[in-house]
Amino acid sequence: MKPTRSFTAMWGWPIAMGVLTAIGLVSALFSDGGFGDMLAWVTLGIPTAACLWFGWLRRRG
């Protein structure tokens, strides 16, 4: 019998990345300079960096 994983262990990071992406897209859409643009950069940069790290850079090494 396989051990079962909890909901947060399986879906925690994908949900966190989705929330970060949604916050970044809404912030980029409705902000015009200042804090909103910085928030968009950070919240959209984190999922992008994670995708680069786990998808492309770790395969090359």
Image: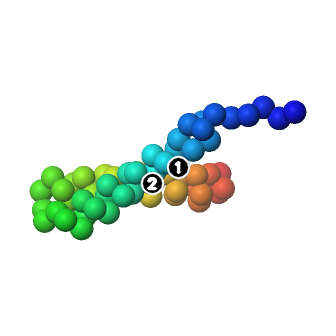
Q: Is residue 28 above or below residue 18?
A: below
Q: In which quarter of the image is residue 32?
A: bottom left
Say how many tags the image has: 2
* Residue found at the far right of this picture: 1
Query: Tag 2's secondary structure?
Result: helix
- The foreground one among 45 and 11 is 11
Query: Tag 1's secondary structure?
Result: helix
Q: Which mark is residue 29?
A: none
Q: Name the residue under label 2.
A: 18
Q: Name the residue under label 1.
A: 14
- Give the side of residue 35 with respect to residue 20, left or right: left
* Amino acid type of the residue that numbered disc 2 sits on in the rendered structure: Gly
Q: Where is residue 42 in the image (x, y as percent from the top left)?
A: 31, 52
Q: In this view, does 9 lie above or below 55?
A: above
Q: How crowded is mark 1: few (under 14 residues within 10 Å), some or many (20 or more)?
A: few
Separation (CA) of disc 1 from disc 2? 6 Å
Cβ atoms at labels 1 and 2 below 8 Å apart: yes
Quadrant of image for the N terminus: top right
- The foreground one among 61 and 8 is 8
- Give the side of residue 32 with respect to residue 1, left or right: left
Q: Residue drawn at (19%, 65%), measured in percent from left and top?
A: 30
Q: Quadrant of residue 25?
A: bottom left
Q: Where is residue 22 in the image (x, y as percent from the top left)?
A: 36, 58
